[in-house]
């Protein structure tokens, strides 16, 4: 069942839901199903059942798995394919990749959910034709899929740039949304950080001129500054629930980035910071892009 005429299967494993996609590419999706993220055993059993049904009905040529993290991405490590220490109750130390791939004699690719989304955008969306690209999601947390010379970064672990610590704006003494850092990007700019800063005030009642958006825009722009000064992505795409619900934020980021760089480095012409072209499908198509690469490899 590994012929090139078969579709590939992809799983985006998220904190609240998992999306499975059977596809030939972004323009030819055969099936897409959702499994709620509950306990590891319940969730993985649900994912296994969908994959088994697809295998019997269609077959697939490769499997891509893009998971929330932190995860182990070192194939030489006994924990490869495992979710490591996570705040998601019950999921620390869960074998995800090897368990899901075991029944199917096809190539398997495993990576973070944001790296998968970055690879999808490079194949079909805002990163087409580029070798160095960053995909940022600003939602409940802040994640970065960082692609350098055509491949996701590795080293001692995957990219965790959401936890880079940055200066707060003068006078910002509001609580952080991160239990580990009082001044990281995730703590200041994520949906969790926004709720921490607003306290009892509902986000829905906050206008575009509220100071909380200054805090969010400043933190995300400093994240972009850090990427420009280190890996130098040719383009940065920023999505996620916060950006989708607050579309005024995106237009603020490019000017803030250029002000922060202050002419020291040459930032590509605008639009340099863009919205993901794939929208909500960037995440689900990520493991499909990974599986297509694995099939070729």
Image: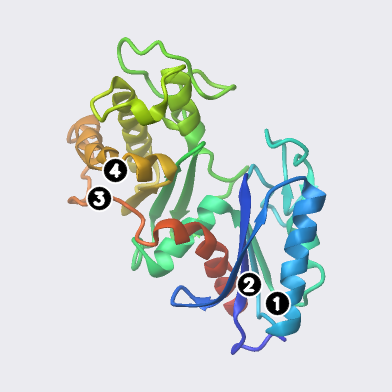
The picture places residue 245, in percent across and down from the top left corner, at 36, 42
Q: Quadrant of residue 109?
A: bottom right
Q: Which residue is mark 1?
A: 54
N-term mark: 1 or 3: 1
Find residue 9 and name its label: 2
Density class for disc 1 (Cα within 10 Å; few <14, some 14-19, many ≥20) is some
Residue at (25% x, 39% y) in the render: 248
Closer to the camera in the image, 247 or 162? 247
In the image, residue 25 lies at what x, y percent?
A: 49, 76
Examine the image and state in which quarter residue 189 appears.
top left
The residue drawn where x is 79% and y is 42% is 93
Between the residue at mark 1 and the residue at mark 3, the CA separation in whole angstroms equals: 40 Å
Name the residue tied to disc 3. Answer: 272
Classed neighbour count for the residue bearing mark 3: other residues with Cα under 10 Å, few (<14), some (14–19), many (≥20): some
Query: From the viewer's perspective, is the residue at label 1 or at label 2 nearer?
Result: 1
Asked if residue 68 lies left or right of residue 143, the reply is: right
Q: How is the image coloured?
A: rainbow
Q: Earlier in the sequence, mark 3 or mark 2?
A: 2
């Amino acid at each position: 069942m590994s012929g090139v005429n078969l579709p590939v299967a992809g799983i985006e494993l998220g904190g609240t839901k998992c999306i499975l996609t059977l596809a030939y590419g972004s323009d030819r999706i055969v099936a897409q199903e959702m499994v709620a993220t509950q306990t590891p055993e319940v969730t993985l059993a649900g994912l296994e059942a969908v994959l088994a049904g697809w295998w019997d009905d269609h077959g697939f040529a490769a499997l891509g798995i893009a998971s929330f993290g932190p995860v182990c991405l070192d194939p030489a490590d006994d924990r490869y394919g495992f979710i490591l220490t996570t705040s998601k109750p019950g999921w620390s130390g869960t074998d995800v990749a090897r368990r899901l791939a075991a029944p199917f004699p096809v190539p398997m690719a495993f990576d973070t959910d944001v790296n998968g989304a970055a690879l999808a955008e490079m194949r079909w969306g805002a990163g087409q034709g580029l070798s160095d690209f960053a995909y940022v999601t600003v939602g409940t947390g802040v994640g970065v899929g960082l692609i350098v010379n055509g491949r996701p970064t590795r080293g001692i672990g995957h990219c965790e740039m959401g936890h880079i610590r940055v200066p707060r704006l003068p006078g910002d003494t509001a609580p952080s949304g991160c239990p580990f850092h009082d001044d990281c990007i995730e703590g200041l700019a994520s949906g969790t950080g926004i709720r921490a800063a607003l306290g009892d005030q509902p986000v829905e009642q906050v206008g575009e001129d509220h100071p909380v958006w200054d805090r969010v825009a400043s933190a995300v722009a400093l994240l972009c500054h850090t990427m420009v000064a280190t890996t130098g992505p040719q383009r940065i795409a920023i999505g996620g629930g916060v950006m989708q619900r607050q579309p005024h934020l995106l237009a603020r980021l490019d000017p803030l980035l250029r002000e922060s760089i202050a002419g020291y480095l040459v930032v590509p012409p605008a639009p340099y910071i863009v919205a993901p072209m794939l929208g909500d499908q960037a995440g689900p198509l990520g493991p499909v892009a990974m599986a297509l690469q694995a099939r070729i490899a």
